[in-house]
Amino acid sequence: MNANTGIIFRIKQYAIHDGPGIRTTVFFKGCPLDCWWCHNPEGIRMTPETCQPAAGSGRKPEILGTRMTVEAVLAAVEKDVIFYDQSGGGVTFSGGEPLMQAEFLFALLDACRQQDIHATVDTSGYAPADIFKRALAKADRVLFDLKLVDDAAHKKFTGVSNDLILSNFRAAQASDKVQVRFPVIPGITDNPENIERLAKLAAVSGKIKRFDLLPYHRTAAAKYQRLGLVDRMNGMAAPTTEQMDMLQDRIARYGFTVRVGG
């Protein structure tokens, strides 16, 4: 993987939940985590893969993942510059985990800066410290996904330890670029102890002002079947509005601006 090319599985225009304003979200292939609730399972594997059509749709199988150059991605992003200017938006690099294709990401961030396009990186924080620090320095904003404080639970439900993630998060707290995103997964992340520990951790520096709650939903269920993957959340219900309201109030006590859905 070189700096000028990377593998992208989707470019979403007119996104309103991936940072400020109206944005274009660029989804990178590859993720070192294997979260049970992943909403983008097509982003887990680094290589392009075949997604079977829905039964009875009459459609052909779809190849997910295309090698693109920095210039090609930037051309797609620049189509919506007028919306960025009007709304205070820009581009968000998500995934998957964009830091898995770090040099490509850095080249894109540099290109965005040259074109005066606001660039956000959405990350799990699971990356070598030097790579994470470079991303933090180059990005205009970092959406940092925090899931579980307990390491054993983190290993069980994501496949990796959270030591590196928490280390990078603590280092990031010195910056005012960071915004926390928390997936609300019933029975896994939404227990009171985990919520309190995460809120206290995020409040330490006083520089993190925004805390977004991302409620679990079932919209990705069909993707698992089409990709031949096991849906470990099969049958799990989404959190209720009342549950989300209670959670929002609890985290707001720590001084955060809390929003549901980003």
Image (tube, rainbow, N blue to C red):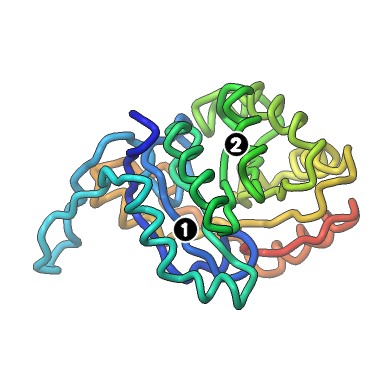
Pick the front one: 240 or 40: 40
Name the residue tied to disc 1. 25
Pick the front one: 210 or 186: 210
Q: Mark 1: give few (<14), some (14-19) or many (20+) Cα within 10 Å.
A: many
Q: Quadrant of the N terminus?
A: top left
Which amino acid, mark 1?
A: Thr
Q: Is residue 165 above or below residue 89?
A: above
Q: Earlier in the sequence, mark 1 or mark 2?
A: 1
Residue at the location (61% across, 31% down)? 134
Are the residues at dot 1 and dot 2 in contact (C-beta closer than 8 Å)? no
Name the residue tied to disc 2. 135
Residue at the location (47% across, 45% down)? 108
Instruction: Count all numbered tags in the image, as a single digit.
Output: 2
How far across and how far down the image is residue 210, in percent?
77, 55
Residue 255: which quarter of the image?
A: bottom right
Residue at the location (58% across, 38% down)? 124
| Separation (CA) of disc 1 from disc 2 | 17 Å
